[in-house]
Image (tube, rainbow, N blue to C red):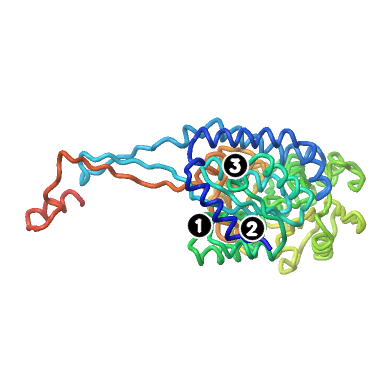
């Protein structure tokens, strides 16, 4: 039986040597990780295909290439991000100097999901290494081939007391969460995220939770319908809709609903052909359980387009469903599959009312040429991040923070934000010794208090 407390203790011992805190050390470790990923590119792609049916193109663009670009960005900027940041000093601390320093948390736990099983483990790991931490990685057991490749890469690249991998399912995850870590980074469902947060709270361990939710997509009556359909299909088609920021449902203006339906069908055929089952660019559902769950949503409304399934291959076509009853499961659950419900709206108030039924989405998308309408939505709808006239592309910009709020998560990462997620910014005030303000010491008199009040307010 694995002794998790012993594993963490070994990591702590290595962390206390302070080797991981050196900037050159961190950059060298990132370089080694980059080289190992490139050397194992084919093995990673093969594993992703076996687990999720991902094409080589999708494996590169959404997993391997994404990870390598993240490493490149961090390596390029790490020295700048790690510098002491000087701050202003107030009048009360006259002649003092103020600054902040970013320090590692220590030993971190990174828990990855199954939908992007490589990238969503490696991206936070890059931040952990950049921050100077040691890490324990728990990849998803639902993507076993990718999990094995991750372990091989980590074991051949790093010392076991620096970064280690724990394989297993729910019992192993529960055992890990009983331990005290200095930071936990979890990507997964809202339900499991609440469990992780509860476990972390017992040790007052800070967490980053990258969760999900129902991400709405608005198509108003000024939108370019061809581009809207193409970009919605792109966002929904990647990984067969098993993406936390995939468009979950579409709210289309009543006046353009029929045109949108017609355009949607044409664009799907242009992008994927007549038969999605044989298209190498289109994946499948992760397992039987999720396949059956997503397939069941097809009956929650009127079939507009698609609807074909294949039980043997866990395949579901890109499917458009017109929904009239918004109390159906399809409008309550995060779909996490290639089923796209559509609801028509006529007024802004109606639109907002529907969105607020599923608060705090991880992503939000609006297709419109009406800037006032867009600005109003951005102001009125709380969400993690989003796009105007596009879907999912915001997360490809390493200069933007990625994360949710409320039920879609807490904290963010990517680029500099990954470095900040895995470091604590501590403040330091250096006071002068050649001068000491006598008024701050007792005995206090009325004149001293009057002077201090003038200084403070």
> Is 110 drawn above or below residue 223 in the view shown?
below
Query: Can residue 154 be seen here?
Result: yes
Q: Identify which residue, 428 or 242, lies in the foreground.
A: 428
Q: Which residue is mark 1?
A: 206
Q: Which mark is residue 351?
A: 2
Q: Contact, CB < 8 Å: mark 1 with mark 2?
A: no
Name the quadrant containing residue 173: bottom right
In the picture, residue 333 is in which quadrant?
bottom right
Comparing marks 1 and 2, which lies closer to the viewer?
1
Whichever of callouts 1 and 3 sits on the residue coming sooner in the sequence is 3
Name which residue lies at 80% across and 64% down. 293
Asked if the residue at tag 3 contacts the one at tag 1, i.e. Cβ–Cβ closer than 8 Å, the answer is no
Q: Earlier in the sequence, mark 2 or mark 3?
A: 3
- How many angstroms separate mark 1 from mark 2 (CA)? 36 Å
**Pointer 3: what residue?**
126
Task: Name the one closer to the observer, 101 or 17.
Answer: 17
């Amino acid at each position: 039986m694995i002794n998790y407390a012993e594993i963490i203790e070994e990591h702590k011992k290595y962390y206390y040597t302070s080797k991981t805190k050196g900037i050159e050390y961190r950059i060298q470790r990132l370089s080694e990780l980059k080289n190992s990923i490139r050397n194992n590119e084919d093995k990673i792609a093969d594993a992703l295909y076996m687990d999720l049916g991902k094409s080589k193109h999708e494996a590169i663009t959404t997993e391997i290439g994404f990870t390598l670009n993240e490493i490149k960005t961090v390596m390029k900027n790490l020295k700048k991000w790690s510098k002491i940041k000087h701050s202003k000093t107030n009048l009360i601390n006259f002649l003092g100097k103020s600054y902040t320093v970013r320090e590692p948390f220590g030993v971190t736990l990174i828990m990855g999901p199954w939908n992007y099983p490589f990238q969503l483990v490696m991206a936070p790991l890059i931040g952990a290494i950049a921050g100077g931490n040691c890490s324990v990685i728990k990849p998803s057991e639902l993507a076993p081939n990718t999990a094995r490749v991750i372990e091989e890469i980590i074991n051949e690249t790093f010392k076991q007391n620096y970064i280690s991998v724990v394989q297993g399912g729910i019992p192993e995850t529960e055992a890990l969460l009983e331990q005290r870590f200095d930071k936990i980074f979890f990507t997964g469902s809202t339900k499991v995220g609440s469990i992780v947060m509860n476990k972390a709270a017992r040790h007052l361990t800070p967490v980053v939770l990258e969760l999900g939710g129902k991400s709405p997509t608005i198509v108003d009556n000024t939108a370019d319908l061809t581009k809207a359909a193409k970009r919605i299909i792109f966002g929904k088609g990647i990984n067969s809709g098993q993406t936390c920021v995939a468009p979950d449902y579409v709210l289309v203006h009543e006046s353009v609903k029929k045109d949108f339906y017609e355009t949607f069908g044409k664009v799907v055929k242009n992008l994927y052909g007549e038969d999605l089952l044989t298209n190498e660019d289109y994946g499948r559902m992760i397992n039987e359980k999720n396949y059956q769950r997503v397939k069941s949503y097809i009956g929650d409304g009127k079939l507009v387009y698609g609807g074909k399934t294949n039980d043997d291959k866990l395949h579901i076509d890109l499917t458009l469903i017109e929904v009239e009853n918004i109390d159906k499961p399809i409008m309550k659950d995060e779909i996490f599959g290639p089923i796209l419900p559509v609801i028509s709206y006529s007024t802004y108030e109606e639109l907002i009312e529907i969105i607020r039924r599923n608060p705090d989405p991880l992503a939000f998308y609006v297709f419109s040429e009406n800037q006032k309408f867009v600005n109003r939505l951005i102001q009125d709808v709380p969400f993690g991040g989003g796009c105007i006239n596009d879907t999912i592309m915001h997360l490809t910009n390493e200069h933007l923070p990625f994360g949710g709020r409320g039920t879609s998560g807490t904290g963010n990462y990517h680029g500099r934000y990954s470095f900040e997620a895995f470091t604590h910014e501590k403040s330091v005030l250096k006071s002068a010794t050649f001068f000491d303000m006598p008024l701050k010491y007792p005995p206090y008199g009325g004149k001293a208090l009057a002077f201090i009040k003038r200084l403070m307010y």
